[in-house]
Amino acid sequence: MSLQALRAELDRRCGPEWESNGPMPLLTLEEFFDSHDSLRVHDQTRRGLLALRERPEVHDVRLGLTRWEADPEPEYFYVITTLTVAAVRNELRACLIDATEMGVRNEHRATESIALPKGYRKVWAWID
């Protein structure tokens, strides 16, 4: 998916960025990184998040976007996992992602719905 196609898809799902007060879109790793294939700066982060998603304790990893008009950048990472918040923080640090805040409750903004398998939780990380 091209960057232009990603922006159009986000506008379709959530409304234009500047008008959206709805749930924050949660992109798959492929949706985000495939649209940024020319940006090598994301390569280590992409590899780290893909490796994290392959762990048996992790069901999925999603990226939360609050802006997508210009060059979309995730501000939130969501890990669907059985791992603790501390363990997820350590995994994100290994991907060179420094989480300012993390938790399983009290998110800053509502998100698109995402299925949670039994026994898993959605751990969020805010990237400032």
Image: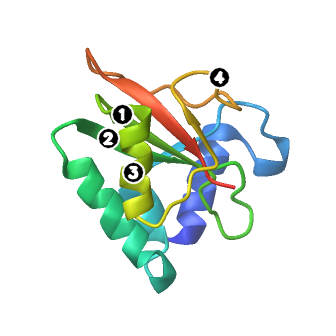
Report helix, strand or loop for mark 2: strand
- On residue 60, the disc is 2
Specify the quadrant of the image occupied by residue 61. top left
- On residue 10, the disc is none
First reached walking from the N terminus: tag 2 or tag 3: 2
Report helix, strand or loop for mark 1: strand
In which quadrant will I find the N terminus? Answer: bottom left
Residue 106 image position (x, y, % from top left): 65, 22
Q: Nearer the viewer, residue 100 or 72?
A: 100
Q: Nearer the viewer, residue 49 or 22?
A: 49
First reached walking from the N terminus: tag 2 or tag 4: 2
Check contact, mark 1 vs mark 2: CB within 8 A: yes
First reached walking from the N terminus: tag 4 or tag 3: 3
Amino acid type, label 3: Asn
As measured in the structure, the alpha-carbon distance from the residue carrying label 4 to the one carrying label 1 is 16 Å
- On residue 80, the disc is 1
Q: Residue furthest left?
A: 56
Relative to 56, residue 98 above or below: below
Q: Mark 4 highlights which residue?
A: 106
